[in-house]
Image (spheres, rainbow, N blue to C red):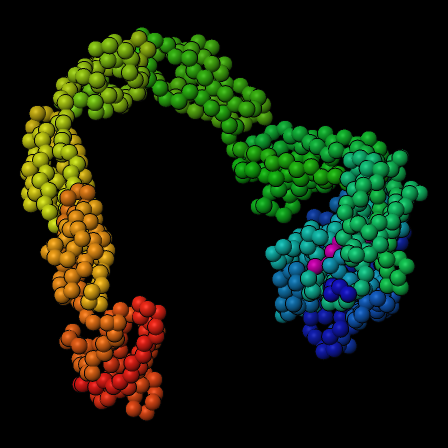
Amino acid sequence: MRILLIVTMLGLVSLAARADHIIGGEMYYSFLGKNGNNNRYRVTLKLFIRCDAREEQIDAYADITFYSGNGNHITTLRADHDNTEQYTATDVDPCIVNPPYVCYQIGYYSTIIELTPSANGYVAAFQRCCRRTGLTNIFSDNTVGATYSVVIPGTPNGFDTNNGPRFSKEKGVVVCANNRFSYDYSAEDPDGDSLVYSFTTAYSGATQNNPKPVDSDPPPYSPVSYRTTFSADQPLGDKVSIDPHTGIISGIAPRSGLYIVTVTAKEYRDGVYIGENKKEFQFTVESCVKQVVASTQDTYKDCQSFTINFSNNSTPGKPYFWDFGDGDTLTTWSRDALPHTYRDTGTYIVKLAVDRNSSCGDSMLATVRVYPVLTPSFSVNGLCTTRPTEFINTSYNRYGVIEYFRWDFGDPAVTNDTSNNSNPTYHFTQPGDYPVKLLVQNSKGCEQSFFDTLTIYDKPPFTATNDTLLCYRNGLQFHAESPLPGTFEWAPLYNIVNPRTATPYATPAVDTTYEVTFTDNSGCVNSKKIFVDVRDTIYVRTTADSTICTGDPVELKAGADGEYAFTWTDLNTNQVVGTDSIITVTPARSATYHVRVSLGDCFSDDTVSFRAVDPPVAYAGLDTTVCYGERAFLNASGGAFYKWQPAGTLTSPNKPNTIAWPQDTTLYIVTVTDTLGCPKAVPDSVMVNVVPPVPAFAGNDTIIIKGQSLQLNASGGETYRWSPPDGLSRTDIHNPVTSYNRDITYHLQVYTSEGCLGEDDILVRFMSGPEIYVPNAFTPNGDGVNDVFRPLPVGITKLELFRIYNRWGEEIFRTNEYMKGWDGKMRGRPADAGTYVWIVQGTNTAGELMEKRGTVTLIR
């Protein structure tokens, strides 16, 4: 099921008695005939009241005040309370799960008045406080009242015997929102005149201090203030509209709340406007639940084509049945836009039924007007604030006649910037851009809008020649232009030809200010002054001669006493190199440049010369390589002054010759300057590659069995030297074999390809074996001597295990890694001094398993 909103017409469910009891109203008149020369009218007031209003809030009478059409007070009559009617919603959709209670009352008051026929007509008005508080679309509190009035037309065209329209649809309804709803807000006219409906503003009136004035105020009345996103034209938001021909309000209901909705019914007879009537309703929007909703537009009336694209905003996932009103039908499960082409013009009633075989299916009707083509448009005459703008309707209509126009001139400064005339005039008093909208409706019910933005000016726009310089030998062709039709006139008439055109020609001999005046076709005027500065002499001056570095760009700059044309020429090549007051050139050698400034036939010249000096040729020397810890000698040349970077590893960073001692490979940059005239500092660089320390490695100290040989395996360089040679097979390879039978220390020298040296030693001990030697004590005190207890395997190819236990038999250390031992700690903390048991196993060169056990003393 879908959670939706509900619209209840004048729905009132509060049980508490409230002071804000007024929820709407209407006033209309009926012509009763003549009494001599006077006209007799019955004026009726309908006052909408909450069902929970207190008895004393239902007035026993109403004071209706009458004014002449020009605002003079005529009289105030007491209108008797004829009766009170109560309305509730009776036709409630059974598929709404929680239908609300809808209730309101209408109090009827009427009086009879005789009025002398008048060309200006009369106004009847009633004011009452207080309006319902807490309204969603307008600002209101318990001090805001309301005004209900009606205009009785005057004698022109015999309209003083007219019967005014009156609204008659009072039935309460319940419609779920978040989908389309429809409410009949139509009126009746006793004379059969045609009516055109539109939303309009509600009016305030009366106060809490004077809630029921005897004499109501004369017109004009103050409109209420609408909240953001709402307006008089959109009292229920931009998703709800009113059909101007039927008075049906339809669309998607807004969020929950209380809404004031005022509708005007304008009365026409044979296309001539007679008058209008207003009715104010209060809508209450509440939450409800409805299972299935049918939703499409209520009307399709743009009349642009025989093909109509029908929208479908109904409950998804249901079958949709369309009856297009011309004999064609279609059933579909798609909610996509559905095009349908009608074969002939006409007004068709389209039905959309959703899930029509279900007990809670829904349907709705839409009116389709097929009378193509209606195209609104207009042109204008006069866009100046000094006179009204004339609007000329140029709309195209093929079927019927255009019988309704509504112009909105987009003037934010006023509220009455509208018109219903076909060719109105409107006076824009301030310049600016105004969005003008024209809405047209024809007799076939078609409706279309046209928008255009008008730029209103207080002076007609035009452009003309700016202030300018002129050589006394020359003349000047003026230019003026406007996007508007009109005329130009120039003054003074001093040495000027064709002064009443847009392009006169002038030859002033002295400084002269000319003024051009433009007058558009509506008589709006604008002017502009142009100062002509006549020069008989002009001046130019460039920079002083100077010395530059060969190959460097140089800026040529010239100053003149006016906005002239500049021409720079390289006198070495006679080539033009620039036409601006400041240019940049790169001389290949010493050069002289000529500059000329010109104003017509007037000119002036100057020159500037540059002597080119070659910059120093910096040389930092060849890249070199040194061993780690050695020094590098750097030697630079090419100038008078030197600066080396980085300076931190140099002995003399400001001399050409310096010594470097880099720790790793370093790029040294020397900047060289000289005193020959080119101050440019020229850099060069030299790379000093540093060979890292040689990682000479002779091998780990080792123990071998007497009578067996040992192959050494050194690493770290390219060339190897062993000493002493005792017992060695060779002394110049990395892996010689020794068969010595005494303890000996071999010294190794390793050289890289660059000749860098590294050194290391290896101790070779010879012991009887195979055997596992285990010491009987150790002192783990951190002095580097006898800190670790470990076995010494001789002739053992693999250490199987080495374990240590305390006196309680708890294992505290184990390993099977060769030459790894116990550091005297237990669970990360120093173990107690005392005796510990050990066991060691290993496999000898014959593949036999050897095992030894014993004790060791830990001494602290």
State left or right for residue 651 relative to residue 94: left
Front position in the image: 613 or 279:
613
> Residue 251 lies in magenta, yes or no?
yes
Query: How many labels were placed on the picture?
Result: 0
Q: Position of residue 679 (x, y in %)?
A: 12, 29
Residue extending furthest right? 327
What residue is at 18 percent from the left and 39 percent from the top?
687
Is residue 615 among the parts visible in the rendering?
Answer: yes
Front position in the image: 460 or 441:
441
Q: Hey, which quadrant is residue 109 in on the image?
A: bottom right
Q: Hey, which quadrant is residue 675 in on the image?
A: top left
Residue extending furthest bottom? 808
Q: Is residue 550 above or below residue 695?
A: above
State left or right for residue 131 relative to residue 600: right
Q: Position of residue 271 (x, y in %)?
A: 82, 38
State left or right for residue 787 relative to residue 330: left
Front position in the image: 797 or 212:
797
Q: In what quadrant of the picture does the C terminus appear?
A: bottom left
Tell me which secondary structure the magenta stretch mostly adopts. strand
> Residue 436 lies in magenta, yes or no?
no
Q: Position of residue 67 (x, y in %)?
A: 73, 54
What residue is at 14 percent from the left and 22 percent from the top?
614
What residue is at 16 percent from the left and 73 percent from the top?
784
**Boundaries of the magenta span:** 247-254
Front position in the image: 710 or 464:
710
Q: Position of residue 676 (x, y in %)?
A: 8, 25
Q: Is residue 212 above or below residue 120?
A: below
